Structures are given as structure tokens and as C-alpha cells.
Image (spheres, helix red, strand yellow):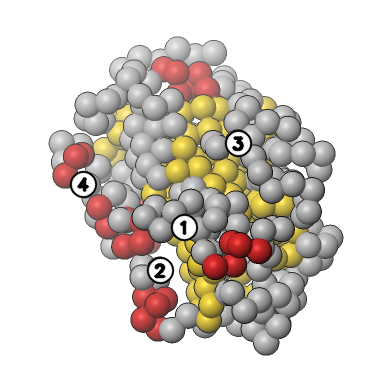
Amino acid sequence: MAEMGLYNTKPKYYQIIIINIFILSSITSSSMASSSSSSSSIDFTTAILIRVDQSGKGDFNKIQDAVESIPPNLNNSQLYFIWVKPGVYREKVVIPADKPYITLSGTKASNTFIVWNDGEDILESPTLTIFASDFVCRFLTIQNKFGTAGQAVALRVAADNAAFYGCVITSYQDTLLDDNGNHYFKNCYIEGATDFICGSASSLYERCHLHSLSSNNGSMTAQMRSSTTEKSGFTFLGCKLTGSGSTFLGRPWGAYSRVVFAYSYFSDVVAPQGWNEWGDSSKKNTVYYGEYKCYGPGADRRQRVKWSKELSEEEASVFLSKDFIGGKDWLRPAPSHFKSALKSNPK
């Protein structure tokens, strides 16, 4: 998206070590359901392990080669776990729609990077694009280093039932294209300046850190809900908002844009008005922008725009659990057992 006031339209759009790592993840996910009715045939405790290692000691040197080695899996019968060994992987990665139930994981985001440098086209620029359902990403840094000259997506999520844990997602403009479907982000760090979380998805961001690079009048979100019947919106629960200048909490990409912040810490980076109408005063009557029990110097609502809401307990309750994204039906714990891929093709 553009900087404030330039324009307001845009087009629509990685064995024991592993087991030890994911014991903790499984514990933290113990409240998640292990399957939905459409995936009841899958053994969620066991995954085929594919190792990516730039030193040549894994099954593949590149992440995309590992993805391409996985056969189409539309019968939803097998989990695949791509373990990416620490390093900087300079490549674009796409998870195609016919390969659901993939987990892409590093060991920790501070030493495992997927990096690309592309911009200006919101659909062509993403460093990592997800088209497959039931995707999980863990402990990776996803970067687009295009800079400040235009749209430069680090991550595009254009599929249903995708979850991200402990990831770092950074760019400047349109960092995270949270395109469509039900999504879950937990303990993630997301950085940008202009509309850096945008799209039409229904997403729950839990305990995430949002950091604005905007010097003045940037926007953290640009949610694109376009009608009252559309089930989409962004909820930020127990998050932390920081930055280097002044930013709005959001502005409406779609006329019925819906964003809620609850139990979140607002530093003084948040502009006193809180929200921006993006040059279209008619959207004041249709957007749904809410805050609930947020705190910190930027949470003072005395100068908030009148068309944002301080939510009541009843109003907020809809947004405060995984029910908002149907998560109890599709969020799954990390696998605890691994088996080797039937075929590997080192490159």
C-alpha cells in the first residue's frame, strides 16, 4: 500500500534435536484440536522429515527444492516436516495449493532466514507465498529487503488454516499480505511502516510484537473486509506495539474493514487519533475498529476518532478466543515422531 495520502486503492491478492525442540511446542499447543472432520485419516503425531542444509549434509540445499520433492497430497493422508538448518537462504519460496499439511521450520528465527529482494508488485514480490491449506511455519525469519520504494511483501498467506509460531516477518510496505482464509500468529515479530499487515483474512494475532518503522502517519493494518456478510477481520490479543515515529492502528482497505486490539500494550508510537479514514469519510459509518482493555501511553482514548469503539465485555468476547478463526477445528500440535522421506534428491 501507499504512504498516507498518496492513493487508497490496490489490486486484490525445515533425530532427536527436532523432537526435543517440539516437545515444548506440543506442550504449548496442548489445547489445540488434532484434527478436523476432513483430516481425520491423518496421524498428526508423525511426519515425514525432509532436511534442508546449505552445507550439503541434508536432503536438499534449497527450501524450494524440498517443497518440490513432496508429491501432491490432496487426499490429506500425510504430514511433511521440512527442517531448515540455520543459515541465510536467498530464494523465493512458494508452497503450492496441491501440497497441504506441510510444516516449514527452522530451529529459531534468530539464525534461520529466508531472504529476497523484490518489490512494486504485491503478488510477485513475496519472499514466501502460501497457497496450500493446513500449513504451519515455525521459528523462521522471513524478509523482503527491497526497501522503502514501494510494495514489498515478505509473506503472503493465500490459503485456509495457516499457523505461524515464533516467526520474524520484516519489510517496509505491505510486509504481511494476510490475504484470505483463517490464520493464527503466535509470538511473532512483524515489522514495517505502511499498511504492514494487510488483506482479507480472518486472523488471530496472539502475543505478537508489531514494530512500526514509520516516521510519521504510517499504518499498522489495512484490513479489507468488503461487506457485513464477509467473515474476516484481524484480532490482536495480548500484543505489543512499538516503533520509531508515529503510526495509526489501522486504515480501511475495504469499506467494512474490521480490526480489534485487546489486552495489548501501546507505546507512544500510536497516534492519539488511533485510526485513519484513508481519505474516504463515508467509511466512518461502516468500519469496525475496536479497542478493549489496552494499556500504555498510546492507549489513551481521549483523542480517538469518534467512529472507533471502546468495546464492552460482551462486544469483545467474540474476538478473544480461537473461535474467531475456527481454530479448535484445525490448529494442531507439532508432530512428536519423524520418519525419513521415501525419496531424497540432494542438491
Sort mark 3 into few (<14), some (14-19) or many (20+) by Cα contacts within 10 Å.
few
Please name which of the two marks, 4 or 2, marks the residue nearer to the observer.
2
Q: Is residue 141 left or right of residue 25?
A: right
| Residue 267, percent from left and from top | 70, 75
Marks 4 and 1 sit apart, C-alpha to C-alpha, by 22 Å
| Residue 307, percent from left and from top | 59, 74
**Compared to 157, does 252 lie above or below?**
below
Cβ atoms under marks 1 and 2 closer than 8 Å: yes
Per the image, the residue denoted by label 1 is 233
N-terminal of the pair, mark 1 or mark 2, is: 1
N-terminal of the pair, mark 1 or mark 3, is: 3
- Badge 4 element: loop
* Residue 65 makes an appearance in the image: yes
Per the image, the residue denoted by label 2 is 319
Residue appearing at x 39%, y 52% in the figure: 230
Marks 4 and 2 sit apart, C-alpha to C-alpha, by 21 Å
Question: Closest to the observer: 247 or 308?
Answer: 308
